[in-house]
Amino acid sequence: MTEAPETFADQLLGFSLPSRHARGRAVRLDGALQEILSAHAYPPAITHLLAEALVITTLVGGLLKDGGEDGDGGQLTMQAQTDGGVVRLLVCDWQGGSLRGYVDFDAERLDALGANPSLTALFGKGYLAVTFDLPKAGGRYQGIVPLEGATLGEAVESYFSQSEQLPTLIRTAVRSGTAGTVAGGLLVQHLAEGEEGRERLHVRLDHPEWEHVAVLAGSTRHDELIDRDLSLEALVWRLFHEEQQVRVEVGAHVSRGCRCSTEHYRAVLSRFPEDEQLAMGDENGVIVVDCAFCSRAFPIDLAPTQG
Ligand SMILES: [Zn+2]
């Protein structure tokens, strides 16, 4: 018998506790995270915030049924924004293992906040929008919740309990050091018996079955989430080994992915009327499009090619 390979970084692990009607996702981002961060030169507080957001996006995106590598383009977008906050906009999205994200912030005002600003200090009165685009199911739906709580994870927990009626627990950890930034996370949620996929009238956060799972999942330690030598299988086993049954399934490989390209922007711009194209371009008819995810500028020449 050969031992099953274990999951360490940049790969989702799905798990479920059938007897407790709970399901979960675990992930640790390492190389993929370094690659996303390398497009920017963010200060530590913003690096930390984006790393946490990318972990949560991966965990939530990993819940999409058609969002795996061989899915048909199901996409999850998390967008946090505010009026007049230090962080103006944070966007992350996930599509079949492709992950990207960026933060738009006021550098001067961030400096004034010190080394470890709270979520409230960063966003002020902010909102979090979670959008699912599901081409196969033919739908797009979005939930918006106030950006409240101590962490982004708490705001996403309240998105699930308020908008989706799903009791959810999220834990994340981020560490930056000489070996770069590593971030890990765990998401667990309760699907009431026989109710998956059905509209529920109310959510029982005090369900004894869920309370039990939440206590176990809540005992995850930060250092376990970011320990590069601890497999996600071992992490899940540590938490739930006393349960009747724990099922695990290796999910999508995670990598930095962006849809920006000269061809993509040319196709988008070509749909604009000619006079608008002229107005957007410089004196040579070149339109410069910025990809905020990649910090890259794409000069697009829409003039008809000679010949
Ligand atoms: Zn890009």
Image: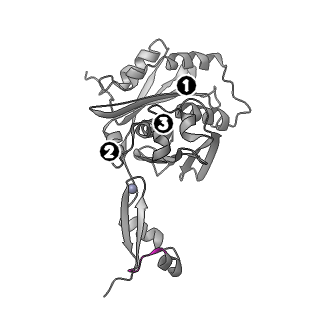
User: Residue at 48% across / 38% down in the picture?
Assistant: 112
Confirm if mark 2 falls within 8 A of ligand 1: no
Farthest residue toward the top?
A: 242
Percent position (x, y) of residue 201?
A: 74, 33
Q: Nearer the viewer, mark 3 or mark 1?
A: 3
User: In whole angstroms, how far apart are the C-alphas of marks 3 and 1?
Assistant: 18 Å
Q: Residue 35 carries which label?
A: 2
Mark toward the start of the polypeptide (2 vs 3): 2
Percent position (x, y) of residue 164?
A: 64, 37
Confirm if mark 1 falls within 8 A of ligand 1: no
Q: In this view, does 251 lie above or below 285?
A: above
**Dot 2: within a 10 Å radius of its alpha carbon, few (fewer than 14), some, or many (20 or more) residues?**
some
User: In whole angstroms, how far apart are the C-alphas of marks 1 and 2?
Assistant: 33 Å
Q: Residue 56 carries which label?
A: 3
**Residues under numbered marks 3 and 1 in contact, where contact means CB atoms less than 8 Å apart:** no
Mark toward the start of the polypeptide (3 vs 1): 1
In the image, which residues are magenta?
280-284
Toward the viewer: 28 or 47?
47
Q: Nearer the viewer, mark 1 or mark 2?
A: 2
Q: Is mark 3 on a helix, strand or loop?
A: helix
> Label 1 is placed on what type of residue?
Ala
**Dot 1: within a 10 Å radius of its alpha carbon, few (fewer than 14), some, or many (20 or more) residues?**
many
Residue annotated with mark 1:
22
